[in-house]
Image (cartoon, helix red, strand yellow):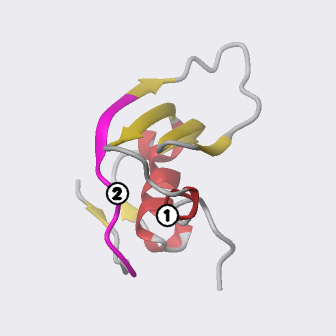
Amino acid sequence: MGILCVGRTAFSQPAFEVATVKLVDTRNGVTDAGVSVYPGGRLVIHALPLKALIVAAYDVGYWQVSGGEDWIAKDIYDVQGQTFGAVGYLQLAAYQVRDRR
């Protein structure tokens, strides 16, 4: 089963030198889900499902991502990334989940 996502890109996305993606153990509960951007190009995403990551990456509505297995909306992940060199906070912050227009 495929996943369909139609989006737009206003400017080029930063590339990451290194990134880790880990499945979160939810047996003890999860708190403080969200995205943090740090100086020097470090990005930390905590406790978000793959579908939410796709929505943020492509700047589309949740309803615009269709298909895929059930786990893309249920299983949650921690993601950490470091860009090549220093990337401005505003450039990375632009990829955080935004209010829908």
Task: Find residue 83 and name its label.
Answer: none
- Compared to 100, does 93 lie above or below? above
Q: CA distance from mark 2 to mark 1?
A: 8 Å
* Foreground pick, 35 / 91: 91
Q: Position of residue 77 (x, y in %)?
A: 50, 32
* Foreground pick, 31 / 84: 84
Q: Position of residue 85 (x, y in %)?
A: 35, 44
Q: In the image, is residue 19 part of the stretch drawn in magenta? A: yes
User: Which segment is the magenta one?
Assistant: 10-20
Give, as a three-letter code, the residue at label 1: Gln
Q: Residues within 10 Å of mark 1 (few under 14, many from 20)?
A: some
- Compared to 67, does 80 lie above or below? above
Q: Are marks 2 and 1 in contact (CB under 8 Å)?
A: yes
Q: Which residue is mark 2?
A: 14
Horizontal relation, residue 71 to residue 6: left or right: right
Q: Position of residue 34 (x, y in %)?
A: 66, 44
Residue at the top extreme?
28
Q: In the image, is residue 77 part of the stretch drawn in magenta? A: no
Residue at the left extreme?
1
* Foreground pick, 12 / 98: 12
- Compared to 29, does 18 lie above or below? below
Horizontal relation, residue 22 to residue 6: left or right: right
Residue drawn at (64%, 68%) of the image:
98
Image quarter for residue 39? top right
Give, as a three-letter code, the residue at label 2: Pro
Q: Position of residue 12 (x, y in %)?
A: 31, 70
Horizontal relation, residue 91 to residue 83: left or right: right
Image quarter for residue 101? bottom right
Residue drawn at (36%, 77%) of the image:
11
Residue drawn at (35%, 33%) of the image:
19
Q: Which residue is mark 1?
A: 91
